[in-house]
Image (cartoon, helix red, strand yellow):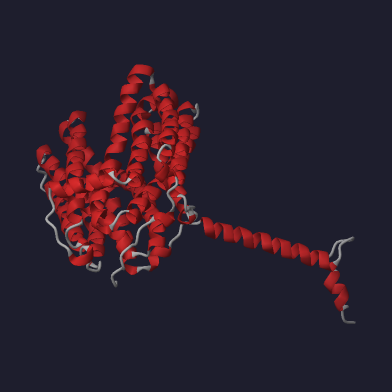
Amino acid sequence: MSADPQSSATDDVSPGDSPNDAGASGEARGSWSERAGRLARRAAIDTTPLREPPFRRLWIGQAVSFTGFQLTSVAISVQVYDLTKSSLWVGLLGPANLIPLIVFGLWGGAVADTMDRRRLLIMASFVTWTATLGLLVQALLHVGSVLLIICLVVVQAVGFAVSSPTRGAVIPRLLPRVLVPAANTLNFTASQVATFVGPVLAGVVIGHGGYAVAYGIDAVLFTVGLYAALRLPALPPVGGEIRKPGVRSVVEGLRFLLTRPVLMMSFVVDIIAMGVAMPRALFPEVADTRFGGEEAVGWLVAAIAIGAVAGGLVSGWIGRIQRQGIALIAVIVVWGLAVAASGLAGSLWLAVLLLAVGGAADLVSAVFRQTILQTYAPDEMRGRLQGVFTVVVAGGPRLGDLRAGVTASAVGATASWTGGGIVCAGLVVVIGLAVPSFRRYTTAARGPVEERPDP
């Protein structure tokens, strides 16, 4: 005897329910799952820029080569200490990196406005690669000269200082304007991954293979970035105008910046965020007095990068934000308050979690600041302003280290840490809202962007 079709259609319906109720429930479940899927897709990091071959190669090259750069940075510090047994010599690596970064970051940005940016990026990349090969050779030959290592660090910093603003100025020439925020998010997320992976890899490599292996890995990884630069299309100055770079050119860029409140404020709020709230210099003391020693320092240092990576992975919403001025103020407030709260945490894991929240906010801040610069500034000024951006990004945290250390010596580590976060949040609101053009800035305020070259 065959089954009753009507009966089988209602077998799974509980008493008191009609088949239509069950169907409606299924539709509701389906709609909720569809909504959840759409929400997840909208929140996930936007990878659309990677469909453009020149940008995809540049992004992969930067991510891979920056991992090697971070590996080498750790290896240099360890080797210098191994040779001298002196933290003073290790400390001298700081100015050896920072001074060329400031000088050649500004100069390199000016040069990027006067010549084919592809050619400049290739030249700067070769300088950096040559310095890395020099480090490899001195390790293989066991030269043991700290002065030679510092000289190679200076050369490496010069190459990095020129290539960094050049690479930033290239992005808007490779992609439609609407994809620039997503491209910056991808870049900053990859950089944070490299900042975390590079040092971890360095510990393993140095422990098992030595300095030469570490520098050799960096040299190999850097070829990926060099290949990406070689495959870029020609990127001559817009209009074909070639000018001679120099001090006057740098001054012109700074003067232009001072006359554009929106651009100026994008730098000011970052200096406030890093110079006032960065607690990095306090990590060793707080780890020792509150969290039990050296292992805690590693977690505190890694927390901001971990948060930035996590924030980047759920950053699909960033490109849809129109009022980027007020949004930038808001995320820096989140950064400041998260830092302040982490300074009061009695548990290491709570402090790490709060710092990670701050790291996610810092990544969003970096994306907004870079996007404003790249889409608001005209192409003929973009390289010089990227040079200023490089200097601010490099110098801000170091100002924060100085501020934190001096304040802690006067009022204690906890007050310095938490107070810096609170002052940052309040200061960025007061200063940010005091500039009408900045708080009202929207993506509609952007100027025209040049046609992209063919890949």
* Quadrant location of the C terminus in the rendered image: bottom left
Q: Quadrant of residue 381?
A: bottom left
In the displayed structure image, the side of residue 336 where residue 406 appears, left or right: left
Residue 208 seen from this side: no
Q: Nearer the viewer, residue 4 or 430?
A: 430
Q: How many callouts does the rendering have?
A: 0
Residue 35 seen from this side: yes
Q: Nearer the viewer, residue 193 or 184?
A: 184
In the displayed structure image, the side of residue 407 where residue 206 appears, left or right: left
Q: Position of residue 178 (x, y in %)?
A: 41, 61
Q: Residue at x 39, y 50 (%)?
A: 367
Q: Position of residue 276 (x, y in %)?
A: 36, 31
Considering only vertical position in the picture, is 67 above or below 284?
A: below
Q: Position of residue 146 (x, y in %)?
A: 12, 38
* Quadrant location of the N terminus in the rendered image: bottom right
In the displayed structure image, the side of residue 451 where residue 353 appears, left or right: right
In the displayed structure image, the side of residue 28 where residue 452 appears, left or right: left
Q: Position of residue 435 (x, y in %)?
A: 40, 40
Q: Residue furthest top?
A: 410
Q: Quadrant of residue 255?
A: top left
Q: Residue at x 78, y 67 (%)?
A: 23
